[in-house]
Image: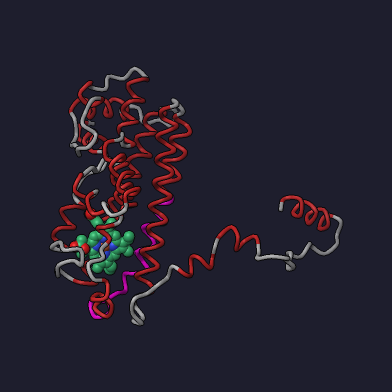
Amino acid sequence: MSTRKLRGSAAEAAGSAPAEPIVEFAEVTPYEQYVGVRELQGLVRTVTDHPAEPSFLVVTQIMELWFTLLRREWELAQRCLRADDLDGAVAAIRRSVHHLRSLNATWGSLMWMTPAEFNGFREQLGEASGFQSYEYRHVEFLLGLKAESVVRPHRALPAVHADLQRALAAPSLEDDVHAYLARRGLPVPADVLDRDRTQPHGAHPGLTALWSEIYADPRPGNDLFALGEALTDVAEEFTTWRQRHVTAVRRAMGAKPGTGGSAGLAWLERSAARVVFPDLWAARTEL
Ligand code: HEM
């Protein structure tokens, strides 16, 4: 591809017509081989003919792909932190903030949906619910929002279940940040480094104090301040995803119970209130 481009620009420089795209292929186009458009289209399997359903299904599928991308970026950031490559970690976290903003913008494709339209295909969803998204659980676990109960629905898929169970007990992105800070000689409390990874946690006074110390110097040269701000962006954008979900639910079904068996809105509001990176927020009160 790059050789063609070079040839094209050489032709342009010489004043002749720019090269035309290739239109003859002996086999299926390289684009199709790479992207798999037919496979993607085959996955848009609506269960009704209601005109509102395709947006609901496609938006959900697109969001699953964003979750996968977020997971890859944060797992990469963890590997970088473990190798003491802070620049590599911050680059991956910053990229993920852009992905989160695009993910959040996707809600726009659903915000038109009224209860009458949602009711047009809701029955046919049976007990299916986003609550059963295991990729979303990986995202939550990487952000430190751990819960054993959300692993249970996936017992019938042994590989998925085992992977989620591993992720439940594994360090979150935040845990890797703390280990890195400790290796840099900062006073990370021992009970933070040893804590039970399967449990969620609130702010810790020692960590809150440590972040306030880092934030006392907010100049670009302070690499740990830059890390803290990238993580705060992640927390903010992820919170936005949860808030926009709550609003979408309120618009499309009011306070009715969910297809997944929960109370719906009230349950979601409580779930969305869990704080991501609590010490980074608590430090702001100290400053
Ligand atoms: C207007 C459309 C939507 C409605 C009415 C809706 C409704 C709900 C409800 C009521 C719940 C609570 C669990 C239950 O009882 O079912 C829930 C959970 C959830 N939904 Fe949606 N949802 C919508 C769109 C989406 C989309 C597009 C996604 C993207 C994957 C999604 C992902 C999730 C996730 C991950 C949860 C679990 C949240 C948590 O554990 O805090 N939802 N949804």
- Residue 115 in view (yes/no): yes
- Residue 246 in view (yes/no): no
Q: Image quarter for residue 111?
A: bottom left
Q: Is residue 222 magenta?
A: no
Q: Main secondary structure of the magenta part?
A: helix
Give percent across and percent down for residue 128.
Answer: 26, 65
Give percent across and percent down for residue 72.
Answer: 43, 44
Query: Observer-nearest residue: 55 or 90?
Result: 55
Give the residue displayed 47% in from the left and 38% down from the top: 91
Left of 81 or right of it: where is 255? left
Q: How many marks?
A: 0
Magenta stretch bounds: 98-117
Q: Is residue 100 magenta?
A: yes
- Relative height, residue 251 to residue 159 (above, below): below
- Relative height, residue 236 to residue 84 (above, below): below
Give percent across and percent down for residue 259.
Answer: 20, 67
- Relative height, residue 63 to residue 41 (above, below): above
- Relative height, residue 127 to residue 47 (above, below): above
**In which quadrant of the rendered image does the C terminus lie?**
top left
Q: Quadrant of ligand 1?
A: bottom left
Q: How is the image coloured?
A: secondary structure
Give the residue displayed 23% in from the left and 21% down from the top: 190
Left of 244 or right of it: where is 13? right
Give the residue displayed 56% in from the left and 60% down from the top: 35
Give percent across and percent down for residue 154.
Answer: 27, 53
